Image: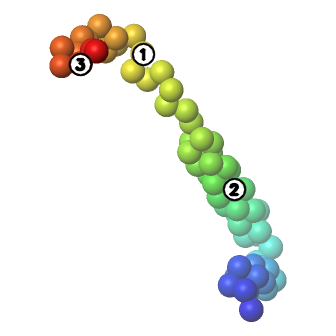
């Protein structure tokens, strides 16, 4: 059996034994994990273009550059 499916079924099975007053706490935690995983996806896709712009590197002259 697939590990993902097994884990998902195990979580659902264990929820049946959880006291009713703890269900909201579990739901809040799951929502936090989902939010956290979505935030990390956005952080990975952040562009780094332009980070060196306007800090002086444009003015550096390469004296070793060969011209024909």
Q: The residue tagged with tag 3: helix, strand or loop?
A: loop
Q: The residue tagged with tag 2: helix, strand or loop?
A: helix
Check disc 3: other Cα within 10 Å, few if <14, some if 14-19, many if 20+.
Answer: few
Seen in the image, is 51 located left or right of residue 10?
A: left
- Locate the C terminus and report the quarter of the image it occupies: top left
Question: N-terminal of the two: label 2 or label 3?
Answer: 2
**Colour approach in the figure:** rainbow
Distance between the Cα atoms at labels 2 and 1? 35 Å
Check disc 2: other Cα within 10 Å, few if <14, some if 14-19, many if 20+.
Answer: few
Q: Which residue is mark 2?
A: 34
Is disc 1 in contact with disc 3, using a CB cutoff of under 8 Å?
Answer: no
- In the image, residue 46 sits, relative to residue 61, either above or below, namely below
Is disc 2 in contact with disc 3, using a CB cutoff of under 8 Å?
Answer: no
Q: Quadrant of residue 17?
A: bottom right
- In the image, residue 48 sits, relative to residue 59, either above or below, namely below
Distance between the Cα atoms at labels 1 and 3? 25 Å
Distance between the Cα atoms at labels 2 and 3? 54 Å
Q: Which residue is mark 1?
A: 53
Seen in the image, is 18 located left or right of residue 45?
A: right
Question: N-terminal of the two: label 1 or label 3?
Answer: 1
Name the front one of labels 1 and 3.
Answer: 3
- Locate the N terminus and report the quarter of the image it occupies: bottom right
Can you give x and y, in whole percent of width and height, for residue 32 in the image? 66, 54
């Amino acid at each position: 059996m697939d590990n993902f499916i097994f884990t998902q079924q195990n979580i659902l099975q264990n929820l049946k034994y959880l006291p009713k007053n703890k269900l909201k706490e579990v739901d809040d935690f799951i929502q936090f994990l989902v939010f956290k995983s979505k935030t990390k996806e956005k952080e990975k896709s952040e562009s780094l273009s332009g980070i060196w712009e306007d800090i002086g590197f444009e003015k550096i002259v390469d004296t070793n550059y060969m011209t024909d």
